[in-house]
Amino acid sequence: MENAIQLKHEHQARLEAAKAAFFNSGGQITQARGFTFKPVFPARSDKIAPDTVLKRRRISPTMAERKILRRLAEE
């Protein structure tokens, strides 16, 4: 455990030395614009398996059709 901590401190010291050398040689930091990740989803397939039964919702009758059906039911 102590060895891992020691290695991390050494690695951090090397990074700090490299950073100091970069700035001492005239290096500058520039702020880049942000990146927004937009995943590309796979295109939806137009193929429908022949075994698939398409269940579609039945269109409900209009008010005029309901009135006609009521009159027919009463007769």
Image (cartoon, helix red, strand yellow):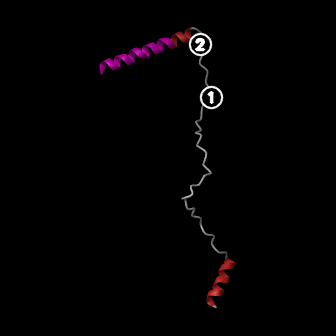
Residue found 67% across the figure and 83% down from its top: 68
Residue type pointed to by label 2: Gly
Label 1, on which residue?
33
Q: Regarding mark 1 in the picture, which secondary structure is present there?
A: loop
Nearest the eye: 69 or 15: 69
Q: Secondary structure at mark 2?
A: loop
Q: Position of residue 39 (x, y in %)?
A: 58, 39
Q: Which mark is residue 19?
A: none
Q: According to the image, label 2 marks what residue? A: 27
Residue 17: within the magenta? yes
> Most extreme residue toward the left, as rendered?
1
Residue found at x 51% / y 14%: 19
- Mark sitting earlier along the chain (1/2): 2
Q: Is residue 56 left or right of residue 20?
A: right
Q: Residues within 10 Å of mark 2 (few under 14, many from 20)?
A: few
Q: Quadrant of residue 43?
A: top right
